[in-house]
Image (spheres, rainbow, N blue to C red):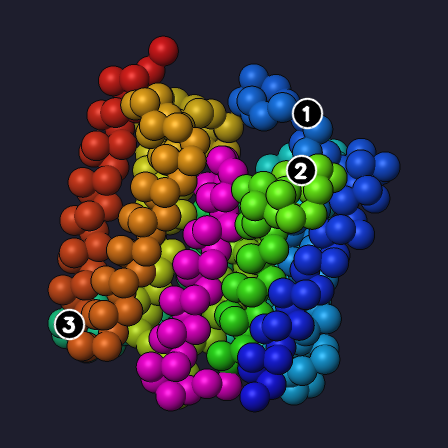
Amino acid sequence: MYTFASAFTAFCFAFFAIKFFKPVAIEVGLVDKPNERKRHAGHIPLIGGISIFMAVLAASLLWLPNTLELRMYLIASAMMVFIGALDDKFDLRVRVRIIGQIIIASLMIYGVGGYIANLGNLFGFGDVNLGPLGILFTYIGIIVVINAYNMVDGIDGLIGSLSINTFTSIALLFIMSGQTDYLSYPLILATATIPYLMFNLGLFERLLGKDTKKIFMGDAGSMFVGLSVIWLLTMGTQGEQASFRPVTALWICAVPLMDMLAIVFRRVRKGKSPFKPDRDHLHHILQRAGLSSRQSLIVITIFAAIMSAIGVLGEYFQVAESTELALFILIFILYNKYARHFSWKYVE
């Protein structure tokens, strides 16, 4: 019963947190200003992520058992949101952000012993056990996922839609496995994101008046989402009571991962820094191909939902992990090939 109560609490807190923090953000200058890469109109408050975190914090403290895992997660999340907010305000250097992410990753790895030690039967010859190398692998995985969700945030509604898709997929996997100890976590995160998405897309305007202009997630939000995703995936795939197989995790966060890896490959091929911003993300390519921002959002969200559905169905029918991995790699190769082709074709 508390699972649904906690989710409803998160939704309500997120809504009111947005209303509270919006004027505060404008007052302190925590806003996104248009530039050559950001072509929105006006200064947009960057309080989506802060509001979502506050809602998750309130719902968790009110309804969830006071466990070590919860305490470490909330502490790590608070640190991630703080670093992200500083980045939103002062545009931190990449090195500073990465150091912060490593420190936060240490809370998960050493605070609760949560690291990726088993990759599953990826090649058909038995489980791939990383042993002590799992700690290094987890550090890399945390940094990759955090930055994948951070980098994919480029058009209205995208990070919100992808986040909800990922969190609901994780919740479904927990339900399917019967291991529901962590079920409240993704449900709280998903429902806390809904008010942000509605404000971001302007869906509240007619109901609540003209003061409900859009807000953005900000780096505080996108990095918080990425941290929450990798935390849940690690808890869900590791240990004797794992809820789903590691290969399934690839499918339910496929779009952010593919977009990040493909664009890093393209930047390295061009001799550019992997962290240098540009306009070669999937949503940019779709827009240059003639789709509107809203059409691009719909196409990418449907693609993400299909990828998640493949992963969930593969888990349900226990498709061989080696088959799922091979299919994922094939789709990524095709994705990278055609994304690069269209990126060059429509370059200005």
Q: CA distance from mark 3 to mark 2?
A: 47 Å
Q: Are marks 3 and 2 in contact (CB under 8 Å)?
A: no
Q: Residues within 10 Å of mark 3 (few under 14, many from 20)?
A: some
Pick the front one: 130 or 288: 288
**Image point (71%, 42%), residue name:** 209
> Which label lies toward us, 2 or 1?
2
> Can residue 72 be found in the magenta stretch?
no
214 on left or right of 331: right
**The N terminus, quarter of image:** bottom right
Q: CA distance from mark 3 to mark 1?
A: 50 Å
Magenta span: chief secondary structure: helix
Of callouts 2 and 1, the N-terminal one:
1
**The C terminus, quarter of image:** top left
Pick the front one: 262 or 5: 5
Q: Are marks 2 and 1 in contact (CB under 8 Å)?
A: yes
The stretch in magenta equals 152-181
**Image point (63%, 23%), residue name:** 41
Mark 3: which secondary structure?
loop
Q: Which residue is mark 2?
A: 213
**Image point (47%, 59%), residue name:** 164
Q: Which residue is mark 1?
A: 42
Please provide percent x and percent y for residue 173.
Answer: 36, 75
Please provide percent x and percent y for residue 24.
Answer: 83, 44
- Rendering quarter of residue 296: top left
